[in-house]
Amino acid sequence: MLKVSPDTITLIAEGKIPKGDPLPVAKVASIQAAKNTSGIIPYCHPIPVEWVDVRFDIGTRAITTDVTIKSVYKTGVEIEALTAASVAALTLYDMMKMLDDGMEIESVRLVSKIGGKNDFRDTFTTPLKAAVVVVSDSVSSGEKTDKSGAVLAERLKSEGLDVVDFQVIPDDEEKIVETLTKFAEDGLAFVATTGGTGLGERDHTPEAMSKVIEREVPGIAETARSYGQDRMPYAMLSRSIAGVRGNTLFLALPGSTKGVEESLDGLFPALLHALTILSGDEGHEKD
């Protein structure tokens, strides 16, 4: 909001601002600022701005600028909107500063934000039970220390899941099938594995999980690969799969720590909605 004198408001209404009508100029400047925010704010990502609306509310002592921005992208556009509103106020100030020494940009604030990831975050009255399975010959034999499984477990906990079991097993198809089947029989809501999804001779996790699940959910693995491919050219080689057995959702993730992190970044919080559907918990709440 830009505070101005009543006389300045009168001059705007009468079209007597020496530099011309400041409102359309401020609108264009605001739109340009929205589209070029990443060049102004160092940590703001370049994003495709789909639509910008700039409106002015002229009072007796202030001009309020409302900016609405729409974009289909992986991050929000609140910084673009705040920058656009700020530039609109600065443009108005610049065009009228010779007439009004008392002008002041009083406030810039976010009014609302919709459509981001948090709009699709399901929460539960009772935490759903989950298990993590590390599939690795070297880790199970003690030759290496697990890292990806620990990262996976912590992420699931941060998403509100109750990780009740954590196992490390070798790259043995029969053992994987046995372990995953037992978790389904125990009624766990979510079982995630890490490891064994590559092209190596001992990578058996997808084949084993295929024998356990009753219905594949291809979109989950496709999304994880697509998200990873934007960051790592080898992500397309992952044979990760996801599917359902009974009310249990299974997900096979890569064995690398980075692969686990990026896959989950692409899948959460939307993945929680699948657990909502499968749980049949009428007491679940949606933020």
Image (cartoon, grey):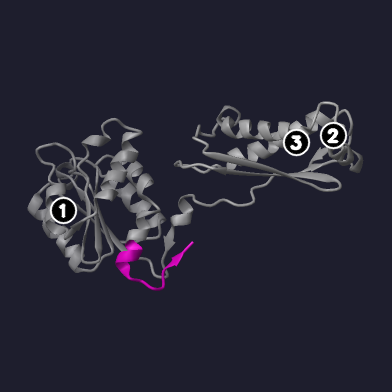
Give the total number of marks visible in the rendering: 3
Is 252 displayed left or right of 137 in the figure? right
Asked if residue 147 can be seen in this view, the reply is no
Depth order, front residue of 138/65: 65
Marks 1 and 2, how far apart at CA: 72 Å
For residue 135: magenta?
no
Q: Earlier in the sequence, mark 1 or mark 2?
A: 2
Q: Amino acid at mark 3?
A: Leu
Residue 23 badge: 3
Local SS, label 3: helix
Q: Quadrant of residue 91?
A: top right
Q: Which residues are magenta?
A: 275-287
Left or right of 186 in this view: 177:
left
Whether the magenta-drawn stretch holds residue 284 is answered as yes
Circle nearer the N terminus (3, 2): 2
Quadrant housing residue 12: top right
Q: Of circles 3 and 2, which is in front?
A: 2
Residue that badge 1 annotates: 209
Q: Nearer the viewer, mark 1 or mark 2?
A: 2
Q: Which mark is drawn over residue 130?
A: none
Is disc 1 in contact with disc 2, using a CB cutoff of under 8 Å? no
Q: Position of residue 8 (x, y in %)?
A: 88, 38
State the residue at coordinates (44%, 56%): 120
Q: What x and y, as percent, mark residue 213?
A: 17, 58
Question: Do we see residue 284 in this rendering?
Answer: yes
Which residue, given by chain and number where applicable, does mark 2 sit on?
A: 15
Alpha carbons under labels 3 and 1: distance apart: 61 Å
Q: Secondary structure at mark 1?
A: helix
Q: Could you tell me which residue is drawn at 69 percent across and 44 percent down?
A: 55
